[in-house]
Image: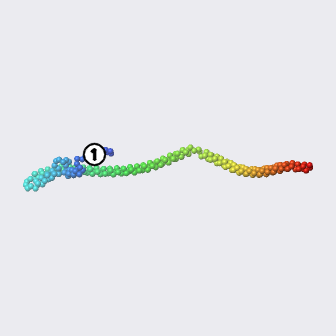
Amino acid sequence: MLKGRRIVGKGEAMAAHYAFGPHEDDAIIKHRLLTRTTTTRGEPPLKKLQKKFTAFVAEVEKSGDNYNDCEKLAKTFLQELTTFEIPLLKSKAVVDANLREKDYYTELKDEINNQILQVQTEIEDLKKELEASKIERKHKEECETIRKLIANQPPRSETEKAIAELEKEIAELEAEDMASARLLDLRKKQFALLLHVVDELQITLESEHRSIVEEMKNLTEEQRVGPETTGSVAMNID
């Protein structure tokens, strides 16, 4: 049944050349099935069988002693009927085989469709697993990066020791800052006192300077007035 069939693969060109059109082919196939002929030549078996049957009936309907002729025609008709029946049985076997083959291919098609659906489901599941694997791998890479960073860091004891030293330095700096602030405040007070003393000294110096200037002025006036008084006294004596 399957011998001689050729399955056209993917990518192969399917070239069909028909001597008749699709409708003419259907008519020819229907006629051949009805007449049991495989070619357009020769007398159809059904017509031959009809002739044998007509001849037998016509001989039977004759009135006369024709028993031998009827028997002979009956045998000829039965032989022709057997000859006609054999292709029918063959056709029935072919039809049954084709039906079984059709059922087989239907089941095979359903099985292939189920396998396709199963494979598609497996592909979707694999896609999800692949995405999950990518995310897991990314997390592992991030964890490995963090682990390397942690490994490059000094031990915790050294870090705590360094923190303690820094806290100690900060306390010392804060103490120095407070001492500096106090010293600065003291220096500000001392500088303010110094400015006050300088102001008072400047005032005292200016007061003394004015006093000296006045004394020198008075002394100059006295020196200038003294000679004049001496000359007047001398003139009066004369």
Question: Where is residue 91 shown, x and y percent of the image?
Answer: 22, 50
Camera-side residue: 90 or 170? 170
- The residue under the point 10% across, 51% down is 69
What colouring does the structure picture have?
Answer: rainbow
Camera-side residue: 73 or 205? 205
- The residue under the point 83% across, 49% down is 220
The residue lying furthest to the left in this view is 64
The residue lying furthest to the right in this view is 237
Q: Which residue is mark 1?
A: 15
Q: Is residue 159 visible?
A: yes
Question: Where is residue 193 shown, x and y percent of the image?
Answer: 74, 51
Give the residue type that dot 1 points to: Ala
Taking 56 as reference, is 168 left or right?
Answer: right
Q: Is residue 93 visible?
A: no
Question: Where is residue 129 shown, x and y percent of the image?
Answer: 44, 49
The residue lying furthest to the top in this view is 152
- The residue under the point 84% across, 49% down is 224
Taking 75 as reference, is 154 left or right?
Answer: right
- The residue under the point 47% across, 49% down is 135
Check disc 1 and report its element: helix, strand or loop. Answer: loop
Camera-side residue: 10 or 62? 10
